[in-house]
Image (cartoon, rainbow, N blue to C red):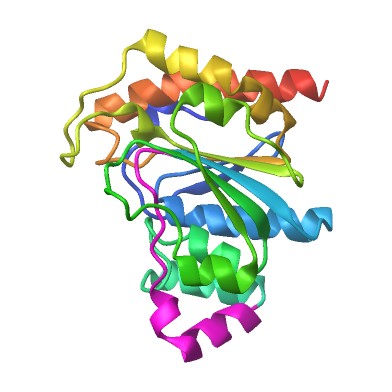
Amino acid sequence: MDVNVDSLQKDDGYFVALPDSVWLMDNHKWALAAWLITMEKSGFAKYTLAHADYHWDDIYDMLESPEVQQRFLAANLYGVLEFIEEEHWIRYDSFIAPAVARGMFDTVHFFCKQDSGSDVGLPIQLLASTGVAQVIHQTPEEFASLHLTSPLIFDLCLDLFNKSTQFQQGDLWSDEEVLGFMNLVRPLIVDASAVTISLSFDCSGTADDTRHLAALVLPLIAAWRASARS
């Protein structure tokens, strides 16, 4: 694994490409860049997204700003990177909907623990205008058995494994629970065209908590991806 876990720290600009089409970042907003790069290299017209995260990350502010939306939809990769770097319209909680608006996905699968009442998932207006299907999974087993309609992108945020909702506070799943989840979704990770992983310092517990989760999860993903491609 080409990551020194002990050196990881909060860094909104941290975004690295690892072997076997794995992308690692701190701020989850960079996942959009990884997905767009993956799509441009592969030539596939559509992907299916599997999003495992404590949070839904379903915000779409551009819906109320059609001029900005049109500028974003017309942007090339470098233009999208400018949107991401600007961090106004695309942030750590608003990177999925812009990808949907650009036609990158046919289906989005969510496994999220955040209790948002009945207001969960992507805006209905966005789903209707793009024809994208949304599937909300209630259990890890259900999520792991998702039905693929296109090549898969697997997206994971380490704060999934933190039960605390307070910044820089950790109430982590046990190691056994984390590893149990990872083994359930292993086939998805292995088969995915790309895997994006957000460290999410501050949301995934203390800094030491985040590094602990990274030390558990990153070597597994690296080994599984490498083994499948050897």
User: What residue sits 59% from the left and 77% below the top?
Assistant: 79
Residue 148 in sight: yes
**What count of labels does the image hold?**
0
Give the image location of residue 82, x and y in percent.
51, 74
Residue 88 belongs to magenta span: no
User: What residue sits 35% from the left and 45% below the top?
Assistant: 55
Give the image location of residue 207, x and y in percent.
25, 32
- The N terminus: image quadrant: top right
User: What residue sits 67% from the left and 48% below the top?
Assistant: 48
Q: Outermost residue toward the bottom? A: 67
Residue 69 belongs to magenta span: yes
Residue 2 in sight: no
Q: Is residue 58 above or below residue 5?
A: below
Give the image location of residue 41, x and y in percent.
79, 56
User: What residue sits 76% from the left and 61% below the top?
Assistant: 40
Tell me: 217 left or right of 37: left
Magenta stretch: give its range. Answer: 53-75
Tell me: 49 left or right of 167: right
The quadrant where residue 70 appears: bottom right
- The C terminus: image quadrant: top right
Q: Is residue 135 above or below residue 190?
A: below
Tell me: 46 left or right of 140: right
In front of the other: 22 or 180:
180
The quadrant where residue 187 appears: top right
Q: Outermost residue toward the top? A: 176
In front of the other: 32 or 215:
32
Q: Is residue 127 above or below residue 159?
A: below
In front of the other: 30 or 166:
166
In front of the other: 190 or 168:
190
